[in-house]
Image: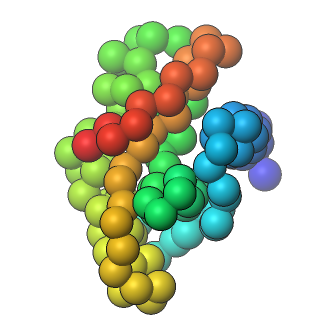
Amino acid sequence: MTSKQAAGAAGEARAADFLAAQGLRIVCRNFRVRGGEIDLVCRDGDTLVFVEVRLRSGGGYGGAAASITKTKQSRLILAARHWLARHGEQACRFDCVLIQEGKLEWLRDAF
């Protein structure tokens, strides 16, 4: 595992711990399909939550939030459709957890 991969895994673990502390239940980590990946799949009551975790060391190039482009959103939606096809249609939303310069920000209903 490269140092970048290790940092990403640590960021995802931190995000999962944070969301669990907020009352969400972690259902799956790193759900992958051809063409897309979801970092965390959680349950918030009756709502399924697909979570993208973005880790940035600095604010260059717009920071963590700006790195979630329309292309990235399309890949997340593709992976979510696969999840729903396998596990049944249900109410869902897309959240983002942004970790930048050590600070964590949770964006509910990000897109």
Q: Residue at x 32, y 26 (%)?
A: 66
Residue 28 or residue 32, whichever sits in front: 28
Residue 20 drawn at (x, y percent): 70, 44
- Residue at 34% across, 80% down: 89
Q: Could one spot residue 4 in this view of the protein?
A: no
101 over 34 or under it: above or below = above
Query: Horizontally, is 52 left or right of 111 in the view?
Result: right
Residue 77 in the image: state x and y as whole percent: 30, 62
Whether residue 105 is visible, yes or no, is: yes
Is residue 108 left or right of 15 when viewed as pictured? left
Whether residue 15 is situated above or below residue 58 in the rendered picture: below
User: Which residue corresponds to the image point at 35% horizontal and 17% vertical from the top-left?
Assistant: 61
Image color mode: rainbow
Against 77, is 15 above or below? above
The image shows residue 95 at horizontal and vertical percentages of: 42, 43
Q: Residue at x 47, y 46 (%)?
A: 52
Q: Looking at the image, which residue sits at the far left?
A: 70
* Residue 87 drawn above or below residue 15: below
Residue 84 picture quarter: bottom left
- Which image quadrant: the C terminus? top left
Residue 62: x and y in percent read 34, 16
Instruction: Count all numbered tags in the image, as a single digit.
Output: 0
Q: Which picture quadrant has residue 13?
A: top right
